[in-house]
Amino acid sequence: MVRIAFDKLKIPYTYISDQKLHEIANLRDKFDVILFGPTPGSSQRIVNGLPKVGPDPIPWKKTDLTPNLGMSPDTTDDMRGGMGLDGIANVQRFVDAGGLFITVASNCSIPIDYGLVDGVSVTPARELKAQGSVLNSTISDKGSPITYGYGDKLAVYFNQAPVFQVSRTGGFQIPPDDAATRPSGRGTATDPDIPQGRPYIAPPPKPEVKPGEEPPMSDEVRESLRAYLPPPGMTPRVVVKFADEKDLLVSGMLAGGRELAGKPVVVDVPRGKGHILLFANNPMWRDETQGSYFLLFNAMMNFASLGVGRK
């Protein structure tokens, strides 16, 4: 999908297999941006690649039997095996040195499961049915270079997963604010919460939390988590998020949309001197989603300055 768009638009690129990621230790010396195209399977299966269960290799190269494979941009004597843990370590060094690593759809499980990012998780969707649908999203951070040139809304292609959850606490769960419901701490849940011996002062109203957002942290919780909170400028940055449930569907199948409403579509996670960019949508699906191409192009052209414009 990506190669079709790049070839049609005459954008130069170097195609490498995931096996090269563990063979090239100095990725940052060769590349500014690595775009890991959509691949099915769990993070462990993608990293491990095809299992080497048999004695014979599985080549991908031109032979008398397969002369058409000679035009492939990358060939190998054995397709089995993937990037491995060495490849993960090389990607980590690449990002820390200032590179941009981009995942699309299910590939986001690689940096999440292997600890390259903090504060981003994939939540299971038990009711959601959105198999290859076009859904509305909103540009939530117009200061990010990734969203340069976009208006308020954007229709994106989405196929069931992933459903992101972003945490400002680096993944630590914020305890419920029980004090906001019973300031005096007296009585049971059904008793009137009226303090004795002093005038009653109503508690401040709770801030409204929209779908997909975290509740605000109190000063006490912030202090208790101070040692674990990411420093300013290093928290995950949601630049595009799905629209409200009533505005989600543009075309295709959608049921259980409340599990997706307000959730992140594009998340920019700083790491070291670089960034890891996670797409829940497929911005280059079958050469048909030109409207979201520039989410990728903007990120690539501004890979060294994605931190500008943060609130």
Image (cartoon, rainbow, N blue to C red):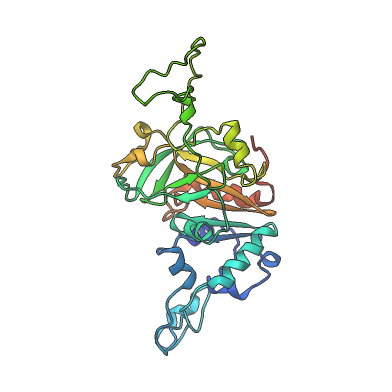
Query: Which quadrant holds the C terminus?
Result: top right
Question: Is 104 in front, or is 164?
Answer: 164
Q: Position of residue 169 (x, y in %)?
A: 56, 43
Query: Looking at the image, which residue sits at the far front?
Result: 197
Question: Is 182 in front, or is 155?
Answer: 182
Query: Which quadrant holds the N terminus?
Result: bottom left
In this rendering, position of residue 137 left or right of residue 258: right
Question: Is 227 in front, or is 34?
Answer: 227
Residue at position x 36%, y 34% from top? Answer: 245
Give the tally of numbered discs: 0
Q: Position of residue 192 (x, y in %)?
A: 38, 18
Q: Position of residue 231 (x, y in %)?
A: 67, 44
In this rendering, position of residue 159 left or right of residue 277: left
Residue at position x 51%, y 80% from top? Answer: 76
Q: Position of residue 172 (x, y in %)?
A: 53, 46
In the displayed structure, would residue 276 be above or below residue 72?
above
Question: Is 233 in front, or is 154?
Answer: 233
In the displayed structure, would residue 308 be above or below residue 103?
above
